[in-house]
Image: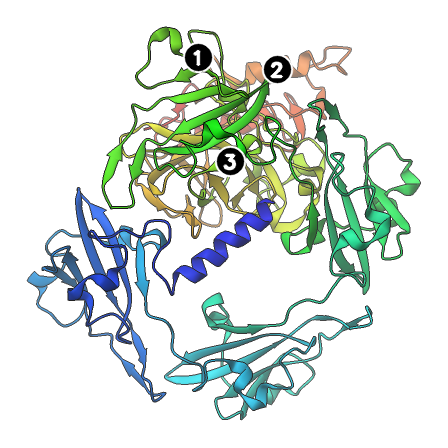
Amino acid sequence: MKAIQLSFYLILFLCSAITVNAQNNSCCGVNDVTELDFLSPYIGNCNYEAIYGFVQDGQEYIYVVADGLCENSDGTFTAIADIENVLFDCEGNIICYEGGEGPQDTQCSFNAYDVSSYVTPSNLKWAYEASSCCGVDDVTELEFLSPYIGNCNYEAIYGFVQDGQEYIYVVADGLCENSDGTFTAIADIENVLFDCEGNIICYEGGEGPQNIQCSFNGYDVSSYLIPANLKWAYEATSYCGVNDVTELDFLSRYLDDCNYESIYSFVLNGEEYIYVVADGYCEYADGTISEIADIPNILYNCQGTIICIDGGEGPEGLQCSFYDIDVSPYLTPANQKWEYKTPTCCGVDDITDLDFLAPFIDNCEYEAIYGFELDGQEYIYVVADGFCEYPDGTISVTSDLGNILFDCEGNFICAVGGFTTPEAQCSFQGIDVTPFIKIENLKWVYKDPILVSPKVYLQGAYVNAPDNLMRDNLRANGLIPLNEPYTGLPDFNGSGENINLFVLETTGANAIVDWVYIDLYKTDGSIAGSRSALLQRDGDIVDVNGSYPVAFYLPEDEYSIRIRHRNHLSVSSQNAFGLNSAISTTIDFNTVEIFGANAMVEMPNAVKAMWGSANAGQVVFQGPGNIPNAVFFDVLTAPGNTSSTSNYIYEGEYKFTDLDMNGEIIFQGANNDVNFTFFTILQHPENTLLSPNFIIYEQNY
């Protein structure tokens, strides 16, 4: 379901480029900026591409953005880089300009107005709708494209402007599913670049000679292949001869069965397969729970014959790995055909059916509702929003509203925060709901989650890496836990995220290195939200499905971000970033300004990484709390070290004393973890005396 949700967010963002923003449509007292008379010269004007509305220092503004290239109605183009962006107040008074040919003292930057951080999708109120493509509103009207429209061999058609000239680019599909269910590899069919008259400009790929290739002729179209330029896309045909996997009889035993969570369909070596994924944790309709980690994933062909299994209790000869079949690269949202629906909550399929929750549903003051079981009893937990923007544009701080815990009959159990007596507080009654406030228990949200895509490196996994990527020894050795490791660790508040085993089967740059922990900070310095996520070899931090941006169910706002890890010093951004639900914000700790001095270690290849060898917020080689002692005692007390030797190699455990994250804890010998700590201390820029008792401290807000 998360795959479906994220696709929806992306579609919503694309749609928002041609409509008034749906989530926050009130602006300067109107629901549509087209109602503001002073903006009429800009609405529908090709010279102006977008209008934003936002609040800065308690004052609401309108910002009109000029277009750098304007396509006129007659098909000609006019460069308008010298037209300035304009900042208005709600009365239509011009505050300042940005860019253009105006004098310096009229520039927003000169007048200390920095609007760049507010030009985000969530603040977009209107956007100029791109004009037609090659003189038509629909590329299906261009006769020279008729051989490609609806043709399985061609998957997409783009339209764009390059150097003032408009082009059509037809993209070939690398694998074509024919109407009879067979597949044809068509990697040798070339992409074609046309002008608007249908003349072929050049080809890309295929078997044609070099001199007709676009690259040979100086045409590089790669940067134009973006969603905004997509004019037509081929819709994939059915799979295994049906339009819905529920039509395949051999799959009936899995549908709506709690033991199985999803079904995928994909083509591998020209053959189509169905892959059924087992759920590692099954909650039945009657409320009982069964651990079913030993149920295997099953690979079928389209006739319902079992090809092989992954995991479970079956013998090695049945395992897909035994047959050298690796399905992990195909377990993508695009290939997901069915997903098990979560069980009911308090006897209903949708909490909007619970009458006592009606005051909270679609109420700006309440942002989320959770359902979970505590001590055998099912509860509903309503979370208040600390910042509420009403449809009329007014804003109310509602931090004094308490979160409320109900039973399934709607009886008030207790509250967390807000104006209530101490006796009404959940803490007074010994009820702690924090372990249950996690994504899988989320039943309703007022707003879509905000999305963030952090990027960071860990010193322990980067050292001795054979390439510019971190090592994934923990994953390769099967040591990364399926449940986040931060619950129960000091100074962490683990939020219960878990992953499916197939996420750890991905190899290459997107292979998982380890779990990390993310804190988002409000501008007042308090923590707005925290959760665990996954770190890939290339430094990308992704959600628990192994590929999506990390989702936080928090209001769209500006947040600073801190990344933590169980044996590395945390790193925090110096500045806040505007996070929204329409598109993920990338925060690369290799390039952004970091809080503190020397808060990251300089690695080869111009990479900055989080300091390794950390414990309890510091790196200590000599003195109280030193790392070598921890390594020594872990090795000495290892279950397999029956002779209690200090040079024993402790393998197969996921522990913080595996400082270089290679799956081995070594006190003495080659690649030992003690030396790793020693040289970490020695290379710190502030350790000018090369003292072994120098301490590296974590630097937090």
Q: Which residue is mark 2?
A: 632
Quadrant where the C terminus is found in the figure: top left
Image quarter of the N terminus: top right
Q: Is residue 481 above or below residue 536?
A: above
Residue at position x 48%, y 17% in the image: 411
User: Is tag 1's residue or tag 3's residue first in the polypeptide sequence?
Assistant: 3
Mark 2: which secondary structure? helix
Coordinates of residue 485 in the picture (x, y in percent)? 58, 25
Three-letter residue code for mark 2: Phe
CA gap, disc 2 and disc 3: 56 Å
Mark 1 to mark 2 CA distance (whole Å): 43 Å
Please state which amino acid type lies under the numbered disc 1: Cys
Name the residue carrying label 1.
426
| Cα distance between the residues tagged 1 and 3 | 24 Å
Q: How many C-alpha atoms fall within 10 Å of the one at disc 1: few (<14), some, or many (≥20)?
A: some
Q: Residue 352: give its label.
A: 3
Kindly report which numbered mark, 1 or 3, lies closer to the viewer in this rendering. 3
Vertical position of residue 509 compared to residue 680: above or below: below
Could you say which disc has been placed on residue 577 in the image? none
Badge nearest the viewer, 1 or 2 = 1
* Vertical arrangement, residue 580 with respect to residue 77, above or below: above
Label 3 secondary element: helix
Q: Position of residue 250 (x, y in %)?
A: 86, 49
